[in-house]
Amino acid sequence: MALAISPLAASPRWTRAETPGARARCGDSAGTSGRGFMGATASGCRGDTVEGKMTCLRLGTCLRLGRSYATSRLVSVHANAPRPGGNGETRAPDPGAPGGPEKDEGEAFRRWLLDKELPKSGKTIARSLSSLPLAIGEFLVIAGFSALGTVIEQNKGAAWYVQNYPVDEPALGFIDYPFILNFGLDHIYTEWYFLALLGALAASLTACTFTRQLPVWRVSADWKFLDRPATLLKMEESETLPRARSSDLASLLARRGYQVFMKGKRMYAFKGLIGRLAPIGVHAGLLLTLGGAAYSGLGGLGGSVMVPEGTEFQIGAGLRRGAPFAPTPAVAKDIVRVNDFTIEYLPNGQVSQFFSDISVVDSKNGREIQRKTISVNVPLREGGVTMYQTDWEIASMQVRVAEVGFKTEDAAATSQGDSGPAPEAEDSATSGSASVELPEGAGESLGLPMANLEGKGNFQGRIWGTFLPLNPDSSDPVEAKRGVTLLARDFQSVAIYASDGSFAGVRRPGSGRPIEVDGLRLVIEDMKGSTGLELKTDPGVPWVYAGFAGLMVTSFLSLLSHSQVWAVQSEGGGGEVLHVGGRSNRAKEEFKSELDDVLNQLPEYI
């Protein structure tokens, strides 16, 4: 069946053509649909074939009827093609047949989706992502989580958060250990929501680069010669100079660092084009930094250990927290030995800096790979693992104990041999007032472990303590619990308390001065510390450093102004006239002054 428009009617109407095989075609110069009828023509209209139908999709189609013209808003001509090998019937082909309308319709839909709809939707999404308010909002949210991760200590054990963020005393009124652990605030930088924020910001920066910065760069990089003086005179800075030449202007601009191009009597000059390209570099630096941070979160390992002085640990045992994509470092089986731990103090007694002398030992042959004294901000790096000095504790106390009735002269004579008796020691019956020095080797030397008492009972601040029982083998439970208590806040002094809780005195470790308490004479010989080390594998650190370096350079370059100057030389009433126009994206006052200076130096030809 074919449809046509009859020219005999007063107005166009649809009629049926008698020719079985006739088909109306959109876009033909003269298409006939049956005898006695003039076919519809649509000059310049495009016809698409879908399911064997000819469809004209253009509005305002011009239809030629004989020698007259008529305009229709939309002409759609459908013609069912006869089935190949049939008897002239005009029914639709079988959808299941190979090459039938179902295949054609699927191909047309695929072309529409890939060539039109997806690019259009992609551009819409890109424009939405490149919104400046959206990017600023993402920056602020990321900054807020980063600040929260700075306030809340990261990658500590659950027991640490239970102790330091109790439910009955939440920080800021709502931050307690259930809040921290439930929302993953103990490892914010590897949580899914933080990584999603980084991805959203990266998407915004990428969209802004392709939809805003790159088009601006392409336009700015084109060399454009303007022909019409009226266009130049509409610019921010413009001037008309009689009896001046564009070649002189080009020479003056070249001396001021402009790139100058001449084409006949037209001139184009620019400088500072790097200022247009630098914002793209800023985005690239930010993307590199964000990528490095995400790579460290997804591919890094981390953990913290507290190691007493003189002991060692395996590196792999300290890397307890990490992402599922994090590879195991090659040095995971090697050993770290803490050789020494020291603390420096300020004159007022506060801690100034603490140092750890550590060695990395090969687990296979026991060879020392590296030895270094680390401190805060001075880490040790080995095999992709970085060890930071972060904390310290008092591990143990060395105490020499002797009973009050012990004869120091006998012990001294034994140790001195023929050198003569030891000096007479002054004894004191008052607890804590003795100044007698125990000879070396007198009494029994005990190593007492120190426990962290911070936040326990009425103790405030960092404090450690140990207990020396008086009668540990007593069958009386009360008597077995009696003993001397020793407390210390640092390595400089130890406070000693009797079994009844009374204060006995203070002694400095290593001073050799004994103190009598509960029938015992005690000398604090030494205190051993534990060093707190944080171990990390950060594969994204080089990316972050490179991103920051690029960001600093491109941020400075983006401050450079992009200045452009055009000139057209034409014939005027009194001779040649030079029309000059220019503009700059920033530093407009400086550009105006510079252009005025250049124009004032132009010679006039009489």
Image: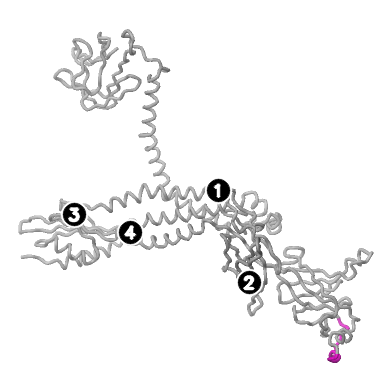
Q: Is residue 164 left or right of residue 598?
A: right
Q: In which quarter of the view is residue 263 placed?
A: bottom left
Q: Which residue is tagged 2?
A: 355
Task: Tell me residue 104's x, y (percent).
Answer: 37, 23
- Please give the range of residues in magenta: 418-430
> Is residue 8 or residue 105 the one in the foreground?
105
- Going from N to C along the chain, the mark reached first, 2 or 1, is 1
Q: Secondary structure at mark 1?
A: helix
Q: Depth-wise, is mark 2 or mark 3 nearer the camera?
A: 2
Q: Main secondary structure of the magenta part?
A: loop
- The image quadrant where one finds the C terminus is bottom left
Q: Which residue is tagged 1?
A: 193
- Residue 57's disc is none
Q: In which quarter of the view is residue 339 placed?
A: bottom right
- Going from N to C along the chain, the mark reached first, 2 or 3, is 3
Q: Three-letter amino acid code at disc 1?
A: Tyr
Residue 428 makes an appearance in the image = no
How far is disc 4 from disc 2 in space, using C-alphas? 47 Å
Name the residue furthest front.
Answer: 365
Q: Secondary structure at mark 3?
A: helix
